Amino acid sequence: MVFSAGIYSAASSILETVSGRTSVARLQSDRITKLNRKLEDQRLINTRYKRHLEKNRKKIGELRTVIRHERHFKSTAISQLGDTQDKLEKLETNASRISTKVIKRSRRTATREIAVMPSEAIPMLGTAAIVGSTALEIHDLCQTMKDMAELRRATNDAQKASTEDLTVCSITLPSSAELWATAYSAPKDAWDRMRIHIPDLDDFSMPESISWPDWEWPWN
């Protein structure tokens, strides 16, 4: 076969030289060469395409990861926004309710204090009015501080009652007899202690002792 192929190739060359035409063998060989070149070019194109496709796949994977994170972030943000909106609505409702209670209580306290003032001016008997009105005023203050503490807890779940709240609500008032005994035994000391908390009082020199009428009062 090799010998025959050699003879055929030599004969084809002689024929091409004599006739000046390209033989069938040469044409087929040229076609095969061109086809091999095209096949090699196509392989190169396919290799480049695969590399490009692989890069695109990586980019698509990265984009999918980003989209997943963005969706999770969006979902979390919407949930948090909903919770915040609910808390704001609850806080607004509590603030409105508490402020209404405080306003009504303050109005009631002011009205009561004005009404009690004349009876407090009555000598001796005014001590009972003072004790009663002061007890009610402290109770109102305590309730107001509790309302404020509730409002603070609405904005901060970890908020607890402060020492001031507990102190005000645990104040024990002296009785009428105790007040009268203090004023009777040391009026100047009682007056000076009051001036510490009410500095706008007129300057008055209270004597060390006062001669009180020797009466029998209900609390004696």
Image: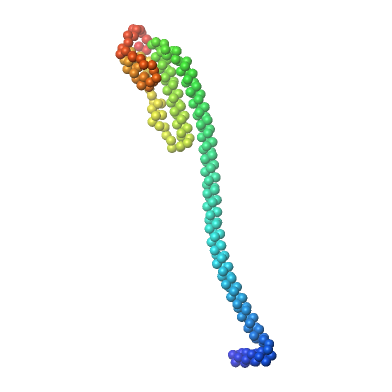
Check the image and name the residue furthest to the top.
214
Q: Quadrant of residue 188?
A: top left
Nearer to me, 108 or 176? 108
From this view, report whether residue 49 is shown above or below residue 76: below
Judge from the rendering whether residue 142 lies leftward or rightward of residue 212; answer left or right. right
Judge from the rendering whether residue 207 lies leftward or rightward of residue 160; answer left or right. left
Q: Residue at x 54, y 63 (%)?
A: 55
Q: Residue 45 in the image: x percent, y percent? A: 59, 71
Q: Quadrant of residue 67?
A: bottom right
From this view, report whether residue 81 is shown above or below residue 4: above
Q: Residue 180 in the image: x percent, y percent? A: 35, 14
Check the image and name the residue furthest to the left.
208
Q: Quadrant of residue 7?
A: bottom right
Q: Quadrant of the C terminus?
A: top left
Q: Residue at x 44, y 25 (%)?
A: 141
Q: Is residue 181 visible?
A: no
Q: Residue 149 in the image: x percent, y percent? A: 45, 31
